[in-house]
Amino acid sequence: MARRRPSEPPILPGFSHIRLLGSGGFADVFLYEQNMPRRQVAVKVMLADVVTENVRQMFQVEANLMAQLSSHPSILTVYQASISADGRPYLVMELCSAQLAERYRRERLPVAEVLRIAVQIGSAIETAHRQGVLHRDIKPSNILTTAYGHPVLSDFGIAATLSAAPTHDTVGMSIPWSAPEVLLDRTPGTVQSEVWSLAATTYSLLAGRSPFEVTDGPNTSDELIGRITRARVPAIGRDDVPEALEAVLRRAMSKDPAKRQQSAIELVRELQRVELELGLVPTQADVAVDDWALATVSDPGDRTIVRAVTPAAAAARPGRRRRRALAAETAVAAEGTGSATAGAGRRVAARSRATAAVLVVVSLLVVGLGAIGTVLALQGDDGIPRVTGIQAARDGSTIVFAWDDPGLLDGDTFRVQVAGGEQTLQRSTEFAVAAVPGDRVCVTVTVVREGRAGAPSSERCAEAGE
């Protein structure tokens, strides 16, 4: 197959060209060295012969989307965007490796590694969805790896807002990882079609091939579309892949979108459950709190930012027992994307939290928003509903507390306080705690509305079993 020659690298003030990194249908990616601060970066440059006003607008959309989202530790960081002297738009991005897309084809990736990647990328997709953005091109080649081995989602070039209604002829797609309803032109993309694509990508990393690709037959576009829209999901074909994981992926790739997990975070939780069943420490899912600066003190001019508490910091408290609240997502206080140091720091911090000696075990039952530090000056308000009738169930050393929804409004959260431990903000009416066998765990639950807390529930206690 003939391939086009790469374009000439543009002259960019403050950057020195080094070499070509790769070529695509609409752009080339070059390695440059930025002069100040001195660092190597990847620069994506649009091809001159495809630059139309529509393409310029798409490129600007990509730049804006990635800039808004790249504070997430699993989304590629964009440093700047501009137009070169010869009129070609370009993006300056964090330098990452694209080896994963080749590696899964030539070697068997460990199940634990694939689950870790899927959870981290899934949390990035969930974050994009909460910002109203569909990626619409989730596939292995769009998962890059940082210098620290952290997976990041790239290429929002054909992304669209959830509220937009783009025409189908403006939508690109990668057939092997596109949902049936997208291939059949029933929709340009939905949250459920992204769930399908994330599952198909996870399947590919495990199987060494896309889900409906065959090794002993034709894999033309028409053949693939026919299998994706009509055939059952084939077995992965690995003895070390548990049936529970195959079942999760089969559900996510159901032909009927209504039968799939209805959000990326729901799929992430099921993958975390598989990690637990395999005896692995569940991978942290990073999803920002909706109102991460909700706490205030009595002086309106003195505001306190709510931050995540790392497991290591919590373990340092004297007299603490080894129990940790299970949380599906840890609150992240984003601090901007202005420098490479900040971008790397976010990822190092995320990995440090996931690998600290005492780890936050991620809940598979709750829509948690993380272990939150002390929330200051949340005053009671009789107009806020009160949680009653908390029930507790034991599953070995795990205790699951559950209660009825007293009538949350949009924006309300439950604040779960573990006695002698952390507070957690969440929307779910279930909360799981991993405790040392024989340990007694007590919780109270309070509804928080617009920075104010209602009356707390009665304390509910339970003892962890063996």
Image (cartoon, rainbow, N blue to C red):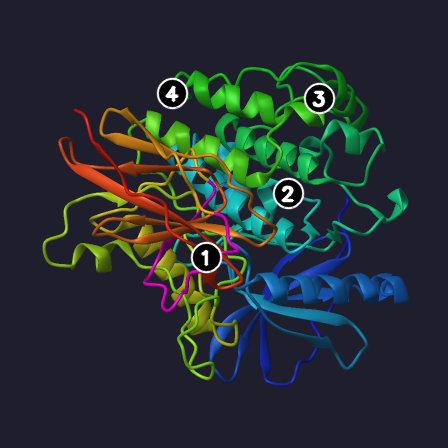
Residue under the point 32% across and 63% down: 374
Q: Residue furthest left?
A: 319
**Nearer-the-camera pick, 216 or 354:** 354
**In the rendered structure, which disc, 2 or 3, sits on the residue that comes first in sequence?**
2
Q: Is residue 127 above or below residue 236?
A: below
Q: Is residue 383 magenta?
A: yes
Q: Position of residue 237 (x, y in %)?
A: 49, 16
Q: Position of residue 35 (x, y in %)?
A: 52, 83
User: What residue did someone put label 3 on?
Assistant: 255
Spatial CA span between label 2 and label 3? 18 Å
For the residues bearing labels 4 and 2, Cβ distance under 8 angstroms: no
Label 3 sits on a secondary structure element that is loop
User: What residue did someone put label 1 on?
Assistant: 146
In the image, the segment drawn in magenta is 367-385
Label 2 sits on a secondary structure element that is loop
The circle drawn on residue 240 is 4
Q: Is residue 33 visible?
A: yes
Quadrant in the rendering for residue 362: top left
Mark 2 Cα shell of 10 Å, populated few (<14), some (14-19), many (≥20):
many
Residue under the point 77% across and 44% down: 2
Q: Position of residue 185 (x, y in %)?
A: 85, 33
